[in-house]
Image (cartoon, helix red, strand yellow):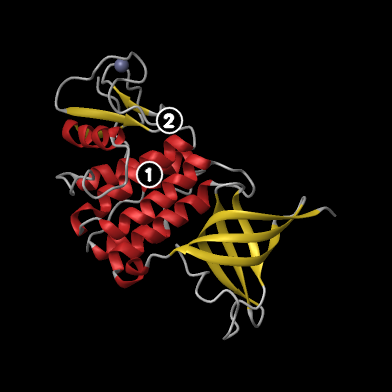
Amino acid sequence: MARHIVKVSAVVLRTRRMGETSKLVTLYTAEYGKLKVVAKGARKPRSRYGAALELFNEIQAVCYLRDGRDLHTLSDGDASLTHPSLSRDMERLVFASAACELIDSVTLEGESNDRLFQCLTGVLRGLEEVRQAQLEPLFWYFQIRAASALGYRPELVQCVSCRRHPDGSWRWFSAAHGGVVCSRCNAGGAIRMAGESLAFLARLQAIRTYKADVIPSLPQGAEEIRDVLRHFLAHYGGGRGGLRALECIDRLNGCTRVPAASHDRLPAES
Ligand SMILES: [Zn+2]
């Protein structure tokens, strides 16, 4: 079986114990997309990996890839960027975990997507920098960018069907149609949201950076924005838009939310 050695830039998405001393590590790499690697001896006290394989770290990894296999071997890994403040703050930790979980759930092994890699490194760096009130808008921005990187850029301004700008104070968002539909084109199954909430999402979509000086603070109507994005990602993420990490965010916020999958869809306006 062909085996080749590669050096890749990667983010540590997930780690799990393996045997007595090793770790099974899920990496998201710029060059090969998601890779599962075995880091032999990584749990030994004086492992050569040190703390390089901590969650969210950006690392330079040397891997042995085996053609036709899902599981590869890590031969070396050095952290090029760590995110210490993500593990010190519960809310930052939860959003960082949700970002990694989202990438893990919407990707397959070995399919590279450089834009998605940039989304992941961008949001993890941003989550360290922004103020508390910007954390969730930053995560929404990441969700919109990730959807675009996967080829599902939501249309947030014009009706996806007739290209008109919807009027009135309410908008309809249809995950199946990939964005906003006007009341005339809504054939059912769309979620109703306030015009201001949609405008907020459109404003996020127009941003081009994860930096703290451009990410807005949490707006009014956060709940419906959350629901629309979850519904949208559940639709395109193969029904796995319900991220476990986000349930922690709900608990942190002290509210119970309707899961995206069972969202109460409003009928079409007549
Ligand atoms: Zn229309």
Tag nearer the camera, 2 or 1: 1
Could you tell whether 101 is left or right of 17 in the image?
A: left
Image point 35% across, 28% down: which residue? 179
Image point 29% across, 49% down: which residue? 138
Q: Quadrant of ligand 1?
A: top left
Q: Which label belongs to residue 176?
A: 2
Mark closest to the chain's N terminus, 2 or 1: 1
- Is residue 153 placed above or below 55 in the rendered structure? above
Badge 2: residue crowd in 10 Å (few <14, some 14–19, many ≥20): few
Q: Secondary structure at mark 2?
A: loop
Specify the amino acid type for callout 1: Gln
Image point 50% across, 74% down: which residue? 51
Q: Quadrant of residue 71?
A: bottom right
**Pick the front one: 204 or 11:** 11
Residue 91 pos. (x, y %): 28, 64
Name the residue that disc number 1 marks: 143
Could you tell whether 158 is left or right of 49 in the image?
A: left
Mark yes or no: residue 230 visible: no
The N terminus lies in which quarter of the figure? bottom right
Q: Quadrant of residue 143?
A: top left
**Pick the front one: 30 or 253:** 30
